[in-house]
Amino acid sequence: MPCAGVGGKTKYAIENATRTRIVVADTKVHILGAFSNIQIARDAVCSLILGAPPGKVYNQMRTVASRIAAK
């Protein structure tokens, strides 16, 4: 099973922060979850694909996770 990041760490961080499930299938990425959460997860995945450093994405996910938890 393919993993995004070292041992899937990045993938799981995005999933947990946005309350979504990400399925990496060959060249396709499927994101399952609530519509607003999918948008956030998609933005994070797109940032990584376009070359953003993982540390920056982790910081964004930390902010998003705290915002979602406050709802």
Image (cartoon, grey):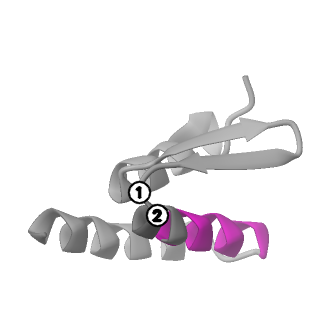
Q: Nearer the viewer, residue 25 or 59?
A: 25
Q: Are marks 1 and 2 in contact (CB under 8 Å)?
A: yes
Quadrant of the rendered structure where residue 36 is? bottom left
Q: Look at the image and say whether residue 15 sits in the magenta stretch.
A: no
Instruction: Check disc 1 and report the residue beneath it.
Output: 34
Q: Which mark is residue 35?
A: 2
Q: Main secondary structure of the magenta part?
A: helix
Q: Seen from this angle, which residue lies furthest front?
A: 35
Q: Secondary structure at mark 2?
A: helix
Q: Nearer the viewer, residue 64 or 21?
A: 21
Q: Position of residue 55 (x, y in %)?
A: 51, 70
Amino acid on which the number 2 mark rests in the picture: Phe
Q: Is residue 53 above or below residue 35?
A: below
Amino acid on which the number 1 mark rests in the picture: Ala
Q: Position of residue 39 (x, y in %)?
A: 52, 70
Q: Position of residue 17 (x, y in %)?
A: 35, 57
Q: Is residue 32 above or below residue 45?
A: above
The Cα atoms of the two marked residues, 1 and 2, are separated by 4 Å
Q: The C terminus lies in which quarter of the figure? A: bottom left
What segment is highlighted magenta in the picture?
Answer: 40-50
Q: Residue at x 47, y 55 (%)?
A: 14
Q: The N terminus lies in which quarter of the figure? A: top right
Q: Residue at x 47, y 43 (%)?
A: 12
Residue 58 visible to an observer of this rendering: no
